[in-house]
Image (tube, helix red, strand yellow):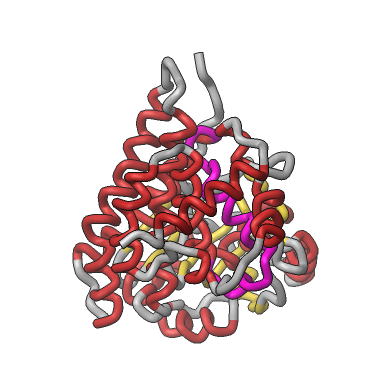
Amino acid sequence: MITYPVKGAPNAYQLGYGVIQQLKELTSQQQLLHGFLIHGDKSWEAAKPFIPEVSCTKESYQNRCTKSEVERLSQVAKNASADYIIGVGGGTICDLAKAVGNQTGLPVFLIPTLASNCAPWTPLSVFYTENGDFDGYEIFSTAVHQVLIDPALILTSPKDYLSAGIGDTIAKWYEADVLSNHLNEQPLSLDIALHAAKICRDELIKNGEKALVDHEKGNVTNAYVRVIETIILAGGMVGGFGEKYGRIAAAHAVHNGLTHLKETSNDLHGNKVAYGILVQLALENNLDEIRNMRQFYSNIGLPTKLKDLNITEFDEEMLYTVAKATVKPGESIHLMGISDASDVVNAIKTVESINQEK
């Protein structure tokens, strides 16, 4: 019998026009008197018109999600005598808010300003070093308290974030599939996770291109909302219900390896994960699927080759820098039984070679 803790969802989730205005009523009902609001400068400018006046101390984050930044923000929250945390922004802000909530023991309200990953849903934070290298992730015992999403606010974000969100979320299927396909029996919770993972792939291939056009035109359509919810809700459910069988495998490990090249420092998380999917498929020797995905990737602006990640020239040493970080102890690629850096190097070369095909 396979058992693991299920952390399927936040305490509450709402998506719709004007739902963020409920923040004041929700906190009042729960006798939460003073919040600590973490934001980025751009995200706050976009979100201000959507957020009601509530008693809170506001603080802009100063770094990516690092252990030291979480310590700093947690101390500011304590000094402010806050009794709940609000995170307004993208994945970094969501991860910081969740980590600060865990550190202080306070409930967390998340208001995403873009749909680039499932961070608003998941009870975990991804940590980086001060230099931007992947440093690990921590799963918390407490779920997010409230997630409030207004699609009109998501429309204010750059289109590239939505494209990257599609890349990050399509990985849910490929990683969950390879992590679970060897199991002779599956708990019901994993069936739910795999169903959500299949939705992630199918829904985004069906509606991803249209959603990006809608985003560019400023139209909130059914396809647009479905893509937002696929990225945040369905994407989050995969890991929430599947736990270690639904979280990450080689695609995210390759992302983590790529963070060790300065050329990729300005690339979005989802773009590097999307390239990681292709490398994972090469490791599985599923070359036809790489070819199948190339056109879709091109249509929505996802990288199909290293050049698309600003790596215009590379040598064996660079490839091994990525590969060694990809297979370092504790990385998720080991869940596939892969620990040899040369296997990763050869897989990257295979992806690059396929991209030379007509």
Residue at position x 56%, y 74% from top? 312
Q: Residue furthest left?
A: 222
Which quarter of the figure has residue 244?
Answer: top right
Above or below 131: residue 332: above
Q: Position of residue 81 (x, y in %)?
A: 73, 67
Quadrant location, the C terminus: bottom left
| As drawn, 276 above or below 250 | below
Above-or-below relation of 5 to 93: above
Range of magenta residues? 244-268
Q: Please tell me whether residue 98 is drawn above or below residue 220 in the rendered image.
A: above
Q: Is residue 37 visible?
A: no
Picture coordinates of residue 293 (x, y %)? 33, 54
Q: Tell me what residue is drawn at x 29 percent, y 72 percent.
A: 212
x and y percent of residue 168 in the render? 45, 56
Q: Position of residue 131 (x, y in %)?
A: 75, 68
Residue drawn 46% across the image and 54% down it? 351
Magenta span includes 24: no
> Which quadrant of the view contains residue 190?
top left
Q: Nearer the viewer, residue 124 or 252?
A: 252
Q: How many marks?
A: 0
Report whether residue 270 is seen: yes
Q: Is residue 256 magenta?
A: yes
In the rendered view, does 66 fall on the left or right side of 157? right
Residue at the image point whose x is 57% and y is 58% from the top: 108
